[in-house]
Image: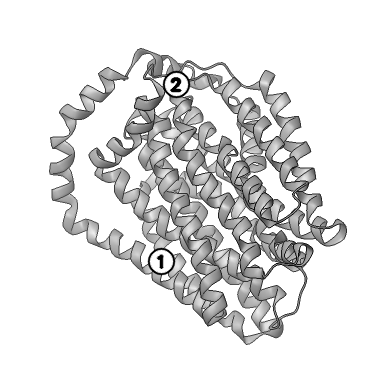
């Protein structure tokens, strides 16, 4: 561990509950910017006179942009002080949201959404920072608190997007989100704690490091598979359910998507519990429950095809179960990877989140395609297939533990060289 990392860990007592709350709130605001377009997508289609499938490109662009931002910008958290980095990223996000609100057509809206996705990666800069400022035995709990903030942002963003968009048009959510992002950027420029970057590597080396970490760290690769499959299914469902609820089967407005998202508010309570379970039992038992919960949610969601009140109950129960599984899996995954390389948490998180949102953006695209071709049943089948792939990888780990341990031992010298280079 480098001296800068040691000094950061020594300040663990300085991360107060108040600051954890502020960081959780910031995570929610940032993450919400890539989720409220899911509820607004049907309104964009009617407002711009394009097909629902074409309007879904706005969601996909934000997801791909987020993956790019994780790869290009999150590693800077290991190289630059966190306070100016986070404030600047939020400021550019606000400008991108203003551009989206004033978009004259679908191409410009897709471009602005991609920019917002690239820069609204603040939560992924905050998580490694917080992990370095708390003791190891509290890391899961703090990750759970930050995840609760992100969950709140996800849920309120969908609800806010659907309701405000229904009342004032699809541009209004983008305008409000821009004002919020700019205000928080100004506040955090003064409120964030001072941190010392753990690395002095040049930017090109920082960009290359996540790929090297993926090659050297088998636990990181395994974790990326878990997240990509579960998050891909999660995004497929939420992209598909917006089309399903506003389609001929239910004939509801975009506001219904936001109301459905509110049902999943229980995940805000489950995230801290999942974090404590990770601290107590370890990440792998939680990951197994996550995979099983994802498969179970696919079965429950399939009953949404019944229509009427019974179908709505199934959709509410299924999305709740899926949300709990996905968020709990994220907490377990981040606790696992942040323990691997304390001197490179930003770069490790870059590799992890890039894989996560590549999986999520692909899942969003596949969800829209599956719904267009096979209807809601196709979306549920896609979720089951992705959940099954993650479960298979987890079960196969028992047979590959020895090989992975041997590979990890073989990389000790390489890791030591990388640490000395940082």
Q: Residues within 10 Å of mark 1 (few under 14, many from 20)?
A: many
Q: Nearer the viewer, mark 2 or mark 1?
A: 2
Instruction: Give the residue furthest to the bottom.
Output: 306
Q: Position of residue 16 (x, y in %)?
A: 60, 25
**For this rendering, which residue is in front, 58 or 240?**
58
Can I make out residue 98 in this image?
yes
Q: Residue 387 shows which numbered tag?
A: 1
Task: Report the residue marked by disc 2.
Answer: 79
Give the residue at x 21% y 57%.
398
Q: Position of residue 369 (x, y in %)?
A: 52, 71
Give the residue at x 47% y 44%.
276
Horizontal side of 4 relative to 18 (left or right) equals left
| In contact (CB < 8 Å): disc 2 and disc 1 | no
Q: Secondary structure at mark 2?
A: loop
Horizontal side of 190 relative to 63 (left or right) equals right
- Vertical side of 276 occupied by 142: above or below: above
The picture quadrant where one finds residue 163 is bottom right
Can I make out residue 140 in this image?
no
- Vertical side of 400 occupied by 30: above or below: above
- Vertical side of 47 occupied by 415: above or below: above
Horizontal side of 335 relative to 129 (left or right) equals left
Give the residue at x 52% y 53%.
327
Tell me how far mark 2 sits from mark 1, CA to CA.
Answer: 36 Å
Which is nearer the N-term, disc 2 or disc 1? 2
The N terminus lies in which quarter of the figure? top left
The picture quadrant where one finds residue 180 is top right
Q: Secondary structure at mark 1?
A: helix
Q: Position of residue 101 (x, y in %)?
A: 77, 47
Q: Position of residue 384 (x, y in %)?
A: 43, 72
Horizontal side of 416 relative to 334 (left or right) equals left
Give the residue at x 69% y 74%.
245
């Amino acid at each position: 561990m480098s001296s800068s990392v040691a000094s950061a860990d020594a300040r663990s007592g300085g991360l107060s509950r108040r600051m954890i709350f502020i960081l959780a709130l910031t995570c929610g605001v940032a993450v919400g910017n890539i989720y409220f377009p899911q509820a607004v997508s049907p309104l964009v289609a009617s407002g711009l006179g394009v097909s629902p499938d074409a309007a879904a490109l706005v969601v996909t662009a934000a997801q791909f942009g987020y993956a790019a931002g994780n790869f290009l910008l999150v590693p800077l958290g290991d190289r630059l002080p966190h306070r100016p980095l986070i404030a600047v990223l939020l400021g550019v996000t606000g400008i991108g949201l203003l551009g989206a609100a004033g978009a004259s057509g679908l191409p410009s809206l897709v471009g602005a959404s991609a920019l917002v996705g690239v820069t609204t990666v603040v939560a992924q800069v905050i998580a490694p920072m917080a992990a370095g400022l708390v003791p190891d035995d509290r890391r899961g709990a703090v990750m759970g608190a930050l995840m609760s903030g992100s969950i709140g942002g996800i849920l309120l963003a969908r609800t806010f997007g659907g309701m405000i968009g229904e009342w004032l048009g699809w541009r209004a959510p983008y305008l409000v989100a821009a004002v919020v992002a700019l205000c928080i950027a100004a506040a955090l420029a003064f409120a964030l704690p001072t941190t010392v970057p753990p690395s002095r590597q040049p930017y090109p080396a920082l960009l290359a490091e996540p790929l090297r970490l993926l090659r050297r760290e088998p636990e990181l690769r395994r974790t990326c598979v878990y997240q990509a499959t579960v998050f891909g299914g999660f995004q497929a469902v939420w992209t598909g359910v917006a089309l399903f609820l506003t389609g001929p089967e239910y004939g509801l407005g975009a506001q219904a998507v936001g109301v459905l998202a509110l049902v999943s508010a229980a995940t805000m309570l489950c995230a801290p519990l999942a974090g404590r379970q990770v601290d107590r039992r370890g990440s792998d038992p939680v990951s197994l429950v996550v995979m099983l919960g994802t498969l179970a949610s696919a079965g429950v969601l399939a009953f949404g095809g019944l229509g009427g009140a019974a179908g709505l109950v199934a959709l509410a129960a299924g999305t709740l179960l899926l949300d709990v599984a996905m968020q709990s899996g994220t907490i377990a995954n981040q606790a696992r990877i942040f323990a691997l390389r304390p001197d490179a948490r930003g770069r490790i998180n870059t590799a992890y989140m890039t894989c996560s949102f590549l999986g999520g953006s692909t899942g969003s695209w596949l969800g829209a395609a599956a719904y267009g071709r096979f209807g809601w049943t196709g979306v549920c089948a896609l979720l089951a297939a992705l959940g099954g792939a993650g479960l298979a990888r987890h079960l196969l780990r028992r047979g590959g533990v020895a090989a992975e341990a041997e590979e990890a031992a073989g990389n000790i010298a390489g890791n030591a060289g990388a640490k000395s280079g940082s």
